[in-house]
Amino acid sequence: MDAIASAEVLVTCPARNFVTLKITTVDGVVGWGDATLNGRELAVASYLRDHIAPLLIGRDSARIEDMWNYLFRGVYWRKGPITMTAIAAVDMALWDIKGKVAGLPVYQLLGGAARDGVLVYTHASGTDIGSLMDDIAAVKERGFKAIRAQTAVPGVEGTYGVKHGKYYEPASTSLPEEQSWSTEAYLNFAPTYLAKVREQFGFDFHLLHDVHHRLTPMEAARFGRSVEDVKLFWMEDPTPADNQESFRLIRSHTTTPVAVGEVLSSIWDIQHLVSEQLIDYIRLSVTHAGGITHMKKVFSFAELYQVRSGSHGPSDISPVGQAAAIHLDMAIPNFGIQEYMGYPDLVADVFHGGPTYEDGYLHPSEVPGLGIDYDEEVAAKFEYAPKYLPVARRLDGSVHDW
Ligand code: GCO
Ligand code: MG
C-alpha cells in the first residue's frame, strides 16, 4: 500500500482566492484537490488543516470510496458546503494520485470517453443592451456554441452577472458590497433583452440565463412563460431551492427548462428535484459537493430521470476543480453542458496545464491524473485577501437573496 505521508493546505490569491489541498504519498506521488468556497475560504482551509489532515496520515491513498465514507459518516456532523468542499478536496487529490499511479487521465478511470469533447457555455454580459450585443458577438467569434446572457437592469445598480473588464468577479471587496434589487424592474426588462438577442443573432446557438435565486416560485413561473419564444437552453436558479417542492409550481406553468444546484452540496439536496422531474439540469459542482466520488453518484441518480448535468464552473472554482469536472463530464452518459468562465491571467502562473478549449468544446488533459500542476513558489507570492460576495437589498432596504 502507498500510504498518505502528508496533507498540506495552500491558500493563494492570484487576483482571487483559491484553497488547494496537496496530498503526498510515502512513494512520493502528489495529488491536488480544490477546496475553494468563495467568501468562506478560510473556514474550509481550517476544516482541512485542523480536522481532516491529521486523519489522513498513514491511510491507504488507493481507497477512495472508503476514505469518502470515513470522512462523511465518520464525523457525525454531515453535509453542508464547508464539509462537502473539504471532502471534495481530499477526493479529488486521491483521484489525481490514482491516475498518476495508473498512468491514465482520470476520465479513463471513470469508464473512458463517452463523448469527443465537453460542450461548454461561457458568459456574455453588458451594462446595457448594446454592450451585451457586442459581447455576444465577441464570444461567438471565439467559437462558443452556448452563451449565458446577462444585462444590467436599468435602475438596479450592481445587477448580478455583469462584467466589469474581462471577467465577472462578484467577490471583490474586503467587506460585502450592498447592492439594490427590484424584482419588478428585472421582470419587465430581462425578457425584452433576451428577445433582442434572438432577433439579432438567431437561434443557431444555445442561449442561457441565470436568474440567480431572485424570484418567488410564481414570479419564476411567469418569467419562464414570458421567455418561451426565446427558447432558452435553461433558466438557472429561478428561485432558491431550499424548498424542493416549490419547483412543482414553476414546472406546472412553463416549458422553459430549469437548472439548479450550484449552492447545494449533496445528493439529498436534489433528491426530490430529480426524482420528481422538477428540473432538467443538475448544477452541483465537483468542488462543493463531495468530489468526483459523490458527483458520479449524483449524475447516475439523475440519469434515471432524464436529468442531465450542467456543472457549475465559475472562476471561483480553481483550475483543479474545473479539471476534475471536465474528466467527469467526459465519462458520464447524461452530460448536458459545462460552465466555463475562464480565469484572470495571473491564475495561469500558479496552476499549469488542464483542459484545452477548441471551438466551443473543452478537452481534458491526457496527462495522468487530473492534469494540473500547482506552482507552490509562485502561489506563495500571492497572499490571501478577504473578498466577500455582495448582499442584495430590495428598494425598501430589506435583505433579498443574492
Ligand atoms: C454561476 C454562478 C456564479 C456564482 C458564484 C458565487 O452560475 O456561475 O451563479 O457566478 O455567483 O460562483 O461564488
Ligand atoms: Mg449561477
Image (tube, rainbow, N blue to C red):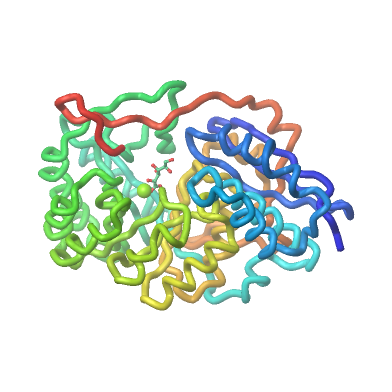
**Residue 32 located left or right of residue 133:** right
Furthest residue in direction right, as rendered: 27
Q: Residue at x 13, y 38 (%)?
A: 185
Q: Nearer the viewer, residue 15 or 312?
A: 312
Q: Residue at x 47, y 57 (%)?
A: 266
Choose top left, top right, bottom left or bottom right for residue 3: bottom right
Q: Is residue 161 above or below residue 175?
A: below
Residue 268 at least partly seen: yes
Furthest residue in direction top, as rendered: 174
Q: Position of residue 9 (x, y in %)?
A: 69, 38
Q: Which quadrant is home to the N terminus?
A: bottom right
Choose top left, top right, bottom left or bottom right for residue 41: top right
Count of numbered marks: 0
Q: Which quadrant is home to the C terminus?
A: top left
Q: Position of residue 356 (x, y in %)?
A: 58, 57
Q: Position of residue 205 (x, y in %)?
A: 31, 63
Q: Residue at x 62, y 41 (%)?
A: 348
Residue 143 at least partly seen: no
Q: Residue at x 59, y 63 (%)?
A: 293
Q: Position of residue 200 (x, y in %)?
A: 20, 54
Furthest residue in direction front, as rendered: 76
**Residue 21 located left or right of residue 189:** right
Choose top left, top right, bottom left or bottom right for residue 182: top left
Q: Nearer the viewer, residue 106 or 82?
A: 82
